[in-house]
Image: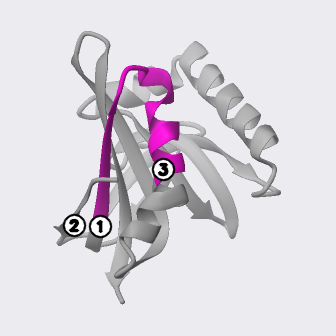
Amino acid sequence: MEYSIKHVAKNYKMTAFGVSFDDFNDWQGNAARTSAKKAEIIANGSLSALTALSDGQIYQINYVLDGKAWRGFGVMGEFNLDGAVVLDFLAGDYLIFSANGTNEMTLADEITSMVFGQGLKEASDYKYIGPGNATFVKSVEKNKFYGEMALRVEKI
């Protein structure tokens, strides 16, 4: 899996809507809760309102929030919207994994699976230190998409 290192000099924030997981290993249940949350914030206009405040790029975010695994959808920057949380992403080195695909709806999950299934093993001289990661997907041409996941790491 292709990756690079990017140094981020300053802490930054992301604002997102999401759900916490009581049991991180309940893959089906967590996927269902995440999907339901995304459908809810699309249907009620919350994600559109948040996107309008930002540069327009939506991220799928995995984070540890209040000691629990959390997954949501949001944007770069700090914004005040009902029900949204502001997440801190810390300065440091980030592993950037990238991939191409033909399905915009599933590419972020595919990248996440590849990164945690094989990518971090291949980047064995780095250790993921969190507290979160973020993935975006964008269209590059008709039915072709590009995605990236960024994870804060330290060299070991």
C-alpha separation, residue under disc 1 versus residue under disc 2: 6 Å
Do the residues under discs 3 and 1 have CB atoms within 8 angstroms?
Answer: no
Q: Amino acid at mark 1?
A: Tyr
Report the front residue among 54 and 156. 156
C-alpha separation, residue under disc 3 versus residue under disc 1: 17 Å
Residue 30 horizontal side relative to residue 11, left or right: right
Q: Nearer the viewer, mark 1 or mark 2?
A: 2
Q: Nearer the viewer, mark 3 or mark 2?
A: 3
* Callout 3 secondary element: helix
Q: Which residue is mark 2?
A: 5
Report the front residue among 56 and 120. 120
Residue 143 horizontal side relative to residue 134, left or right: left
Instruction: Please report whichever mark, 3 or 1, sits nearer to the chain's N-terminal start.
Output: 1
Q: Which residue is mark 3?
A: 114
What is the span of residues highlighted in magenta in the rendered image? Answer: 95-114
Quick check: is 23 in the magenta stretch?
Answer: no
Q: Residue furthest bottom?
A: 156
In this view, 36 is above or below 86: above
Please provide percent x and percent y for residue 139: 26, 21
Mark 3, residues whose alpha carbon is within 10 Å: few (<14), some, or many (≥20)?
A: some
Q: Which residue is mark 1?
A: 94
Please provide percent x and percent y for residue 74: 44, 39
Mark 2, residues whose alpha carbon is within 10 Å: few (<14), some, or many (≥20)?
A: some
C-alpha separation, residue under disc 3 versus residue under disc 2: 17 Å
Q: Residue at x 21, y 67 (%)?
A: 5
* Callout 2 secondary element: strand
Q: Amino acid at mark 2?
A: Ile
Query: Where residue 133 is drawn, which disc sits there?
Result: none
Q: Residue at x 70, y 63 (%)?
A: 68
